[in-house]
Image: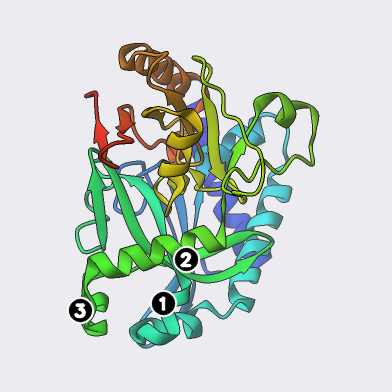
Amino acid sequence: MQKDYEIFIEDLQEKIYQKGEIPRENMKFEREGGKYAIGGDRLLVKFAEHEDAWEMCGVYTQELFRAFQEGRTIEDIVEEIVRDISGIRKADIYEKTRDIWDYEKTKKRLFIRLLNAEKYEDELKDAVYRTLGDVALVLYMKVSEQDDCITSTKIRQSIVKKWNRDCDTVIKEALVNTYLMSPPRIYRWEQMIFDPEYEGENFMDLTGIHELKKDAMGNCLSTSKKTNGAVAVFLPGVAERLAALLESDFYMVFTSIHEVMIHNDRNVEPEDLKEVLQETIKSATPKEDYLTSRIYHYSRATHKFTCVSED
């Protein structure tokens, strides 16, 4: 199996070289745990160089190898990679990121994404973020968006210092932007299964009638774009609205970076939720989508989030 995987990586690089005309020396395979491969093995493809920077695309190779084993041709895989690189080139990301030093040009493009603070410790050393337990709320800038796929970059502390802005204030503004970019939604599993066009429920609409499940099943919270949707619970007014609809405090179970299950705390125990979460992570959460194994709680009285379990 290992030999087949290594051959696949070599073949992948050779075909990217042929199809995308990218020199082999501009490609580097990095095992999981490396600086640029925290969430899994990655092939790093450097496709452009500038005087002060270079542009790189990273693809998770284990995921591609699984698709290859299941019948997808390597030619099809390479075609998609080369197409993605071409799209990034056309997006002119380098020129757009040069605005990063100008806060007035950048502020509307700032947003928050959640990462595991321990898993990504090295990547967060110079980043701008705030932590809750082992969850990091990390500041990013949207560089471009094509077909609902966002290209982004982390904001470094030196940049905020150059802006002459307070980090907490910038993060608060970014949370508002995140809400506007991808509003929170509640998704009901039964409708997701039977209705491909289902776009979730806008429970934040105060003019409508909305009911949340108060039993042990809980409610799936994400955003309209779903990708990186677990951040929804931290967006302005969301936790307060959820607590009001539930008429109680609630527990949060982050099944991945893309969604979080919201449970009325009167009908479940954190120990039981943790057991379910561990099984979900083991059976259904890809490594790159993992956020936390801990259970969190929101208090309606204090408006505070707390971690109520350990790993």
The colour scheme used here is: rainbow
Query: Which of 223 and 13 lies nearest the eye of the viewer?
Result: 223
Q: Is residue 195 above or below residue 105?
A: above
Report which residue position mark 1 lands on.
107
x, y percentage for residue 120? 28, 47
What residue is at 29 percent from the left and 53 percent from the top?
35
Query: How many labels were placed on the picture?
Result: 3
From this viewpoint, is residue 57 visible?
no
Relative placement, left or right, of 17 versus 76 is left
Measure the alpha-carbon separation of dots 3 and 2.
20 Å
Disc ID at residue 214: none
Q: Secondary structure at mark 2?
A: helix
Measure the alpha-carbon separation of dots 1 and 2.
9 Å
Q: Are marks 3 and 2 in contact (CB under 8 Å)?
A: no
Q: Secondary structure at mark 3?
A: helix
Report which residue position mark 2 lands on.
177
Q: Are marks 3 and 1 in contact (CB under 8 Å)?
A: no
Q: Quadrant of residue 15?
A: bottom right
Report which residue position mark 3 lands on.
161
x, y percentage for residue 234? 39, 48
Front: mark 3 or 2 = 2
x, y percentage for residue 132? 25, 43
Query: Which of 180 and 149 lies nearest the eye of the viewer?
Result: 180
Q: Callout 3, which amino acid?
A: Lys
Disc on the earlier residue, 1 or 2: 1
Within 10 Å of disc 3 (Cα), the crowding (few <14, some 14-19, many 20+) is few
